[in-house]
Image (cartoon, grey):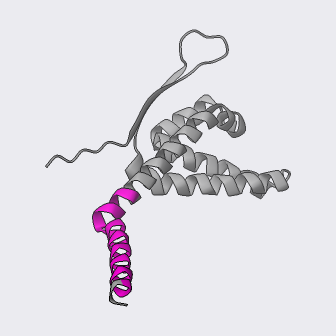
Amino acid sequence: MQIRRQNRIQETLEFYMGEATAPALTVNVDLNTDEMSGAAQKAWDVLSVATVELQRTPERVKAQENYGRAVIALFSVIFGEQDARRVLEFYEGRSEEMLVDLAPFFTEVMEKVQAARNARISQFLALSGKGKAAAMRAEIAQNAALRSTQEG
């Protein structure tokens, strides 16, 4: 039996300053979607709540701090602590600009994480017999109904 880990996201992100032709920063991303799904979803949810809070009360320092922490938490999950720091340094702490630039990548990552999670759940249910059990119950009920009509 061969068992393979297959849900990986591998990307190289290059960050450029203005019209420069060489990247100022290169980050290699290698994620196992199964391993990170819980932490990534939690960080994404916290960021979503912080974004709503910030939109409702943009002048509040606490909302801005919560938003900044949520962005950093998501970056840490996706990039790892060290590369998250490097990306933050590249953007010089401008978390909103950073998030806007990286939103397409984060959206793609979260879609892949969710798809991998759903696939694993489906596989588990099929292997654990949950899907088979429901089919068997339906077949038993159908056979019982057929016998009662034949006996009656």
Determine if residue 61 is in view.
yes
In x, y percent, where is residue 74?
56, 47
Residue 58, placed above or below residue 149: above
Determine if residue 66 is in view.
no
The structure residue drawn at horizontal position 57% and vertical position 9%, both measured from the top left corner, is 21
Q: Nearer the viewer, residue 96 or 104?
A: 104
Left/right placement of residue 60 relative to residue 27 reads right
Which residue is at the far left?
1
The structure residue drawn at horizontal position 32% and vertical position 42%, both measured from the top left corner, is 6
Q: Nearer the viewer, residue 57 or 40?
A: 40
Look at the image and give the residue range highlighted in magenta: 122-149
Q: Is residue 42 magenta?
A: no
In x, y percent, where is residue 134?
37, 72
Left/right placement of residue 144 relative to residue 51 reads left
Quadrant (top left, top right, bottom left, bottom right) of the C terminus: bottom left
The structure residue drawn at horizontal position 48% and vertical position 39%, both measured from the top left corner, is 79
Q: Is residue 146 magenta?
A: yes
In x, y percent, where is residue 147?
32, 84
Which residue is at the far bottom?
152
Q: Name the main secondary structure of what is drawn in magenta.
A: helix
Residue 80, placed above or below residue 62: above
Residue 130, placed above or below residue 22: below
In x, y percent, where is residue 48?
67, 53
Left/right placement of residue 73 relative to residue 133 reads right
Count of marks, rendered view:
0
Q: Nearer the viewer, residue 129 or 70?
A: 129
